[in-house]
């Protein structure tokens, strides 16, 4: 947490610190560092001066970074400008709608205000150079859009007991990294569905063999659904990841039904060779792959390209 303000009462303190360091006052100092001198102080000095009572309205927990160091830095300039910095571990809440998971995008905000000083006594302004945001910032799960100080910072005021209290809100636009989900979820589910197509080239009379493959693929899909889903956020929203694996499960289950139907409808395509071919199986071997390809194009096209637009 970084803050900067001017306190005229500390000019005299700066002069004393300057004299203790250089042995003279600033106007008589001739050293190369005299004009740029900033008194760097610690937590003991910070406890004795006035500080804004920064208040995080959506924060659920604030903890120090460690017990050994106080992690407090105070710098005092000649005009009474104070730069204060202290490290915290802050846990803040952010409502998220997980409908498009893992292609979800979220807008979270960090709201900073004053708890006891209303507008007129203390007016907070978010400084872009103190925000800690830098271009290309990301975490293990999300990519952050570069901070735009004009559009991503908003002042929100609310009346309370005949006074008006304002908060500075910094909005963070986050996009989830979905590359890992292709190897853990989408590719395995897709591969199982494509593997199911092998039964289309097995003689329809071999119903036990075809049913065995179909049932095995269905069971593998069930294990994938419940095994991988347990690692995802536990929310009540129906997620895009759930829709994808459910649709693939329906494709595999429909293939099992097709095996049963194909074993009962026969026509002779060549009486001399007595080669029997199921019309149902022939149609399914075309419609299933084509429909599945269209489904994947629509699903990934919408989630990757349409949402980005």
Image (cartoon, grey):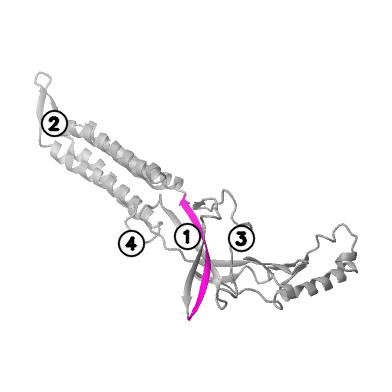
Asked whether, in this view, residue 281 is left or right of residue 193, the answer is left
Name the spot of residue 34 as percent of width and height, x first.
85, 61
Name the spot of residue 87 as percent of width and height, x first.
63, 66
Q: Is residue 223 above or below residue 39?
A: above
Q: Secondary structure at mark 4?
A: loop
Asked whether, in this view, residue 37 is left or right of residue 73, the answer is right
Asked whether, in this view, residue 55 is left or right of residue 197, the answer is right
- Nearer to me, 202 or 139: 139
Look at the numbered discs 1 and 2 and tell me whether their residues touch, using CB distance below 8 Å.
Answer: no
Decide: few, some or many residues near mark 2? Use Cα within 10 Å; few <14, some 14-19, many ≥20. Answer: some
Query: In the image, which is nearer the foreground, mark 3 or mark 1?
Result: 3
Magenta span covers which residues?
161-176
CA–CA distance between discs 1 and 4? 20 Å
Number of marks: 4
Q: Which residue is mark 4?
A: 236
Q: Secondary structure at mark 2?
A: helix
Q: Which residue is mark 2?
A: 279
Residue at 26% over, 41% down: 213
Q: Report the quarter where the C terminus lies.
A: top left
Q: Which residue is mark 1?
A: 108
Return the disc, 1 or 2, that comes first in the chain's sequence. 1
Residue at 32% over, 47% down: 244
Q: Which residue is mark 3?
A: 127
Return the disc, 1 or 4, that comes first in the chain's sequence. 1
């Amino acid at each position: 947490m970084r803050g900067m303000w001017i306190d005229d009462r500390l000019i005299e303190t700066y002069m004393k610190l300057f004299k203790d360091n250089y042995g003279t006052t600033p106007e008589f100092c001739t050293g190369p560092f005299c004009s740029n001198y900033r008194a760097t102080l610690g937590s003991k000095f910070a406890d004795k001066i006035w500080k804004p009572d920064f208040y995080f309205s959506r924060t659920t927990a604030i903890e120090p970074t460690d017990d050994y160091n106080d992690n407090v830095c105070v710098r005092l300039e000649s005009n009474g400008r104070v730069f204060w910095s202290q490290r915290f571990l802050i846990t803040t809440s952010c409502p998220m709608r997980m409908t498009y998971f893992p292609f979800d995008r979220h807008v979270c905000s960090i709201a900073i205000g004053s708890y006891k000083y209303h507008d007129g006594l203390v007016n907070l302004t978010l400084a872009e150079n103190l925000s800690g945001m830098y271009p290309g910032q990301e975490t293990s799960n999300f990519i952050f859009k570069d901070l735009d100080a004009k559009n991503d910072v908003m002042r929100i005021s609310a009346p309370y007991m005949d006074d008006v209290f304002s908060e500075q809100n910094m909005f963070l636009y986050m996009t989830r990294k979905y590359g890992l989900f292709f190897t853990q979820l989408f590719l395995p589910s897709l591969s199982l569905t494509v593997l199911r197509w092998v039964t289309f080239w097995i003689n329809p009379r071999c119903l036990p063999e075809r049913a065995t493959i179909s049932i095995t693929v269905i069971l593998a899909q069930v294990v994938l659904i419940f095994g991988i889903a347990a690692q995802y956020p536990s929310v009540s929203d129906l997620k895009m990841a759930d829709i994808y694996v459910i649709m693939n499960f329906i494709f595999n289950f429909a293939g099992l039904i097709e095996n049963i139907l194909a074993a009962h409808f026969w026509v002779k395509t060549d009486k001399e060779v007595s080669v029997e071919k199921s019309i149902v199986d022939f149609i399914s071997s075309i419609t299933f792959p084509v429909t599945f390809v269209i489904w994947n194009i629509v699903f990934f096209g919408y989630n990757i390209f349409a949402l980005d637009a």
